[in-house]
Image (cartoon, rainbow, N blue to C red):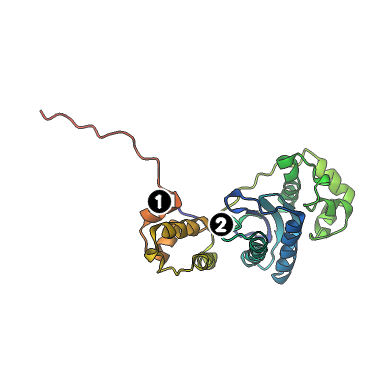
Amino acid sequence: MPRTSRKRSETGFYHVILRGNGKQNLFETDKDRAAFMEAARSSFSRDSVTLIAWCLMDNHVHLIIDDPLDRISTAIQRVTSTYAMYFNHSFGHSGHVFEGRYGSVPIIDDEQLLAAVKYVHNNPLKGMGITPDRYPWCSYSEYASGVSRFADIDPLLELLGGTQAFVMFSINDNVTGYRPAFKKYADEDERATLAQQVFESFGCTATGVKELPKKTRNQVLKALCECGLTVKHVQRLTGIGEWTIRNAAGRINKRRSTHKPQFRDSP
């Protein structure tokens, strides 16, 4: 199935998710969590992106952002690159820290924005049984107290009518349900950057992939597909056949007929 480009938000608001590569933990200590949030603060400031709400879980991150200048790709790449350098240095790790590219859902109106913020804040409750008011690594306490650490809390508090109204909204079970469907596919303008990062991590070039040992070649092909490139795009970049790429990436179509052909006996 061909991959589709990231949908752009007409409002500028997005719900973004970042996952650990292979579902590995992104954070081991509170120091790691603080390092990520500082990376987000500095990166978003450079790209005029505003953080509205956030939640750090062990192996994934939820962010609600306001991106009026459509710099989401650059901003998120800056955050993940900065934190990946910190993570690899701290733990003697090498390779990818995050799983492919980020997932994003455009937010179309105030109702969806409020529902998305509530969804993000309730992640600790769903994942660990911890209510958001007792979980320090999300923006709930910023809204409930009216004191900002990382998030710009003023627009939502103004929309709801203050901190008490926010708390009542957060415990209201009648709020419209929200189930984000995150996209994993890279836009055309992101693919070159993503591919270059993969090539640099393996010390090769696009045209040199086919000359690598089979095991390394397949690792490169899999990494290219996992970071958000389509099979067709990888094929154009590397000159390697589609079947080889699908095989390396684990995308062989398994829905093949198991029926053997039936032949009539000759009369």
Quarter of the image for the C terminus: give it: top left
Crowding around mark 2 (Cα neighbors within 10 Å: few <14, some 14 to 19, many 20+) is many
Amino acid at the residue labelled 2? Gly
**Picture coordinates of residue 42 (x, y %)?**
73, 68
**Picture coordinates of residue 8 (x, y %)?**
61, 60
Earlier along the polypeptide chain: callout 1 or callout 2?
2
Crowding around mark 1 (Cα neighbors within 10 Å: few <14, some 14 to 19, many 20+) is some
Q: Nearer the viewer, residue 24 or 117?
A: 24
- Residue carrying label 2: 100
Identify whether 128 is placed above or below 94: above
Residue under the point 80% across and 47% down: 135
Amino acid at the residue labelled 1? Asn
- Looking at the image, residue 45 sits to the left or right of residue 182; the answer is right
Residue under the point 78% across and 38% down: 173
**Picture coordinates of residue 178 (x, y %)?**
68, 44
Q: Of all residues shown, which one is farthest toward the left?
A: 267
Q: Say whether residue 53 is visible.
A: yes
Q: Nearer the viewer, residue 120 or 195?
A: 195
Residue 124, numbered label: none
- Looking at the image, residue 3 sits to the left or right of residue 213; the answer is right
- Residue carrying label 1: 247
